Amino acid sequence: MSFEGIVCSACSWPLPPELWSGTEGQHCLSCGAPLLLTVFPALTRPHVASLPQPVAADLEASCFYHAQNRAYAPCDECGRFLCSLCTLEIPGRILCPVCFGANMRGRKIENLESSRTMHDTIALSLAVFPAFMFWPVLITAPLTLFWIVRHWNSPSSVPPRTRVRFYLAGLVAVCEISFIVLLIAAIFLVRR
Amino acid sequence: MSEANYRRLTRRNRTWTGFSQAWLGSDHLLIVNSIRFVERYQRFALADIQAIVVSEGGKRAVWQSLVVLICLVAGFASQSSLGRGFFFVIGFCALVLAILDIARGPRCRCVLQTAVSRERLLPISRMPSARAFLAVMIPAIEAAQGNLSAEDLAAHAAATPQIAPAMLTPKPPPLDRSIGFTPEVLFGLLMLDSVLVFVALRSSVGVALGLLPTIYFAEFLIGILALVQSRARSATSLAVLIAAFLCILVDPFALSGIAAWSSLVNAFRQAPSVPQWNLAIGASAGTLLLAAGWRATMAVTGLIVCHFERTARAH
């Protein structure tokens, strides 16, 4: 799929090239919404896809996956020769489709990760919310401590993020456990 | 890419379920969409961004002022201190929200375009944040792509198919919206309620107290829904709907509600410690007939009008 031209972000009506200058005070011709439009050179760049070249002579290296195509680059992971069709370029590396898939599954390349679980938020929620009902704390407070220890070194958010939620969750869980221990001790002493 | 290489571009745009935020990496824009326990990431290489379009959105000042005004009027008109306090607190909250909304600046909608996608950027929802975002993004993208010369732009514009002005281009025919069955549900409910109101006003205080509030609430709720969904309806059915809704508003304060209220007050006055729930409702025959009668009449009229509207649409 490729997009030609630029459309209004409010009504999706195509914006004529006269509006592409990027100056303020322009309005969409369809919905009349004030526009702030910025166009970059990538818009005028032709979309060229490089086709694989066929092997010309017997001595030329060919692609591991396509024997009829000339090798273009080796995979940085497995070293197999690849044609331009099989080459997957990620910043600083070239991978074959198999290694790319393996890296995706193993979450080895941070730039390809599409989601992450926030274990510190889970730990904090586990420590705080059950406290409103009191009794679930008997289970959730130790579980919070286990969760913190288990996921202390798990990757957190891709943008910078501190461990303050882990510290808070640990503090709340320790307070809950201390309170429960004191409560049990008080009940035991009163009954004696 | 190490974590320290990201620069925050926007504040967290919070929603009920999470937030979204924009970050600038060394060679890409990162959009974080969080649903509290999981963060999802979208990356846009700076070299691939073709355009960023920001359009200013509509203002909500009218609606916000209206809510504050209604709450103030209802607060002053309310007889009880509880009602007055309730409406004043709601009105105060609405006023604070309106001031905060105005202080945050006009709303906007930002779309980022690449060769293969057009993505709405959720973190950019206000014009001031959009301007701050563009002030950082434009130099970063130009550093990756270079500057767009006026000649290149003119050449590309010449190659782009000419777009006819929106005023001259015929818009596609409007979609045939389904008219739904909410008005029919309302009129059916009014038919049932005519019987229930009759029963309630002929029985004891306990029965009336159980039935009437439920009847009023259901009629009011479905009436609002029917009015909201009545855009595609004909003028006749809309007029019947509005008349029915006005009757729904008036009935608790003028007909059935007044009749039941006086009996309820009597039941409490006669025995303050244990109310006499078995005390009969002292509704007059006229009130009884009017309360049940308008519901039955509106129900029959509404159902007939809706039937004819559907028949006319089908043909």
Image (cartoon, rainbow, N blue to C red):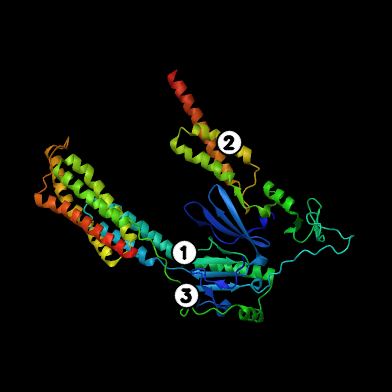
Q: Are marks 1 and 2 in contact (CB under 8 Å)?
A: no
Task: Please tell me which residue lies in front, A185 or A16.
Answer: A16
**Residue A65 image point, x, y percent:** 78, 54
**Residue A154 image point, x, y percent:** 65, 44
Q: Is residue B113 left or right of residue B289?
A: right
Q: Residues within 10 Å of mark 2 (few under 14, many from 20)?
A: many
Quadrant position of residue B88: bottom left
Q: Residues within 10 Å of mark 1 (few under 14, many from 20)?
A: some
Amino acid, disc 1: Arg
Q: Residue at x 53, y 63 (%)?
A: B124
- Tag 1 subunit: B
> Circle 2 sits in a helix, a strand or a loop, which is it?
helix
Q: Is residue B292 left or right of residue A39?
A: left
Q: Are marks 1 and 2 on the same chain?
A: no
Name the residue beneath numbered marker 1.
B104
Q: Is residue B161 above or below residue B304?
A: below
N-terminal-most mark, 3 or 2: 3
Amino acid, disc 2: Leu
Does residue B294 appear in the picture of this structure? yes
Q: CA distance from mark 3 to mark 1?
A: 27 Å
Q: Is residue A5 above or below residue A57?
A: below
Name the residue beneath numbered marker 3.
A30
Q: Nearer the viewer, mark 3 or mark 2?
A: 3
In the picture, which quadrant includes the N terminus of chain A?
A: bottom right
Q: Are marks 3 and 2 in contact (CB under 8 Å)?
A: no
Q: Nearer the viewer, mark 3 or mark 1?
A: 3
Q: Residue at x 59, y 62 (%)?
A: B9
Q: Residue at x 48, y 40 (%)?
A: A129
- Tag 3 subunit: A
Name the residue beneath numbered marker 2.
A145
Q: CA distance from mark 1 to mark 2?
A: 40 Å
